[in-house]
Image: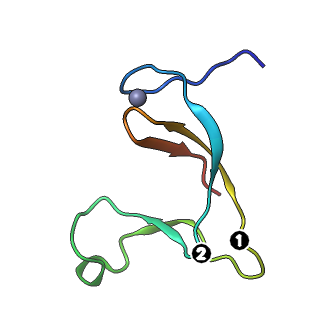
C-alpha cells in the first residue's frame, strides 16, 4: 500500500494506530452540556460489552489530531 494518509492541518504523514476507550465515544454538533443536549448526540463507538475493542486510527502528533473510522 502506498497511499499515505496526510494530515488535513499540516499535511504531515499520519501515524497509524488504534484508539480505544472503556466507554462509548459520542459525537455532538453542540457544545452544550450533555444534560441539555441529550438526544441530539450520536454514538460513534458503542459501549464494549465483552471486551474492549480497538478502533483503527491515524494520528498527527504535530497537530494533536486523531482521525478514526467509526462503526
Ligand atoms: Zn498535522
Image-quadrant location for residue 58: top right
- Whole-Å distance between the Cαs marked 2 and 1? 6 Å
The type of colouring in the image is rainbow
**Outermost residue toward the front?**
61
Q: Residue at x 59, y 75 (%)?
A: 22
- Residue 14 is situated, as x and y percent measured from the top left of the image, at 55, 29
Q: Residue at x 68, y 18 (%)?
A: 3
Nearer to us in this view, 67 or 62: 62
Task: Indicate the quadrant containing the N terminus: top left, top right, bottom left or bottom right.
Answer: top right
Rendered view: 33 above or below 11:
below
Q: Which residue is mark 2?
A: 22
Rendered view: 18 above or below 22:
above
Image-quadrant location for residue 32: bottom left
- Residue 44 is situated, as x and y percent measured from the top left of the image, at 54, 62
- Relative side of 37 to 39, left or right: left
Label 1 Cα neighbours within 10 Å, binned few <14 / some 14-19 / many ≥20? few
Disc on res. 52: 1
Q: Residue at x 60, y 72 (%)?
A: 46
Where disc 2 sits, the SS reads: loop
Q: Residue at x 23, y 64 (%)?
A: 31
Earlier in the chain: of badge 2 and badge 1, it is 2
- Residue 45 is situated, as x and y percent measured from the top left of the image, at 59, 65
Ligand 1, what quadrant? top left
Task: Indicate the quadrant containing the C terminus: top left, top right, bottom left or bottom right.
Answer: bottom right
- Mark 2 and mark 1 residues within 8 Å of each other at the beta carbon: yes
Amino acid at each position: 500500500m502506498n497511499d499515505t494518509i496526510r494530515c488535513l492541518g499540516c499535511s504531515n504523514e499520519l501515524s497509524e494506530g488504534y484508539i480505544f476507550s472503556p466507554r462509548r465515544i459520542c459525537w455532538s454538533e453542540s457544545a452544550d452540556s450533555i444534560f441539555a443536549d441529550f438526544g441530539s448526540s450520536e454514538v460513534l463507538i458503542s459501549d464494549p460489552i465483552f471486551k474492549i475493542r480497538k478502533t483503527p486510527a491515524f494520528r498527527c502528533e504535530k497537530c494533536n489530531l486523531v482521525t478514526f473510522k467509526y462503526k
